Amino acid sequence: MKLIILDRDGVINHDSDAFIKSPEEWVPIPGSLQAIARLNQAGYQVVVATNQSGIGRKLFDMATLNAIHQKMHQMAQQVGATIDAIFFCPHMADDNCDCRKPKPGMLHEIARRYDISLKGVHSVGDSLRDLQSGFVVGCLPHLVLTGKGQKTLDKGGLPPGTRIYPDLAAMVDQLLDAPSEQQNAN
């Protein structure tokens, strides 16, 4: 199985320091949904792993998060893209849960759900915590410079082997144009 794990805010859609709190605030980054469609066409199952502490902060509720994700699914389908699953952590940082990135709990759950090892699975994020959570379970880290990506790059300390791209579309272009990297090591 070819699987790729994407962060949501800052990778697929524009991020906001004030959180994405409504479907109206969820706006895709140009080319991101088309990049997901290209991944699907190449045989990848696309999974989203996203921290959503806005729930824990009571900025929005589960019904609103579901509506945001419904919009994401609908807009993806309009360009021929499918997001296979969305995993999210609703907790705040001080809740000390195992699922909030940079901890790997959400990724362990993805591995269990798909019954695969994540060694060699591509993981794409715009923050250090996205890259760290994937790296510790064996994912190949990819940083996009959209969202918080440029700030993440400027701070440094990226996991070894992190590859850097302007955006998700450029990452997918590189992945699909490099046949030796096309297969996940599962």
Image: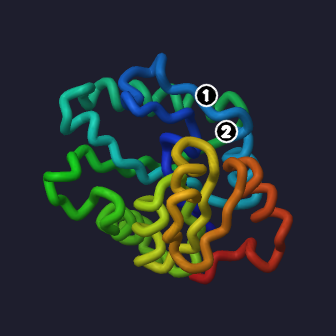
**Mark carried by residue 75:** 1
In-front residue for pair 17/116: 17
Image-based side of 34 in relation to 114, left or right: right
Quadrant into which the C terminus falls: bottom right
* Between discs 2 and 1, the one toward the N terminus: 2
Q: Is label 2 in contact with label 1 (beta carbons under 8 Å)?
A: yes
Q: Position of residue 71 (x, y in %)?
A: 50, 26
**Mark carried by residue 37:** none
Quadrant into which the N terminus falls: bottom right
Which amino acid type corresponds to the residue marked 1 in the rendered image? Met
Q: Position of residue 116 (x, y in %)?
A: 46, 76
Which amino acid type corresponds to the residue marked 2 in the rendered image? Leu
CA separation in Å, label 2 and label 1: 8 Å
Q: Position of residue 56 (x, y in %)?
A: 19, 38
Image-based side of 93 in relation to 26, left or right: left
Look at the numbered disc 1 and give the secondary structure of its residue.
Answer: helix
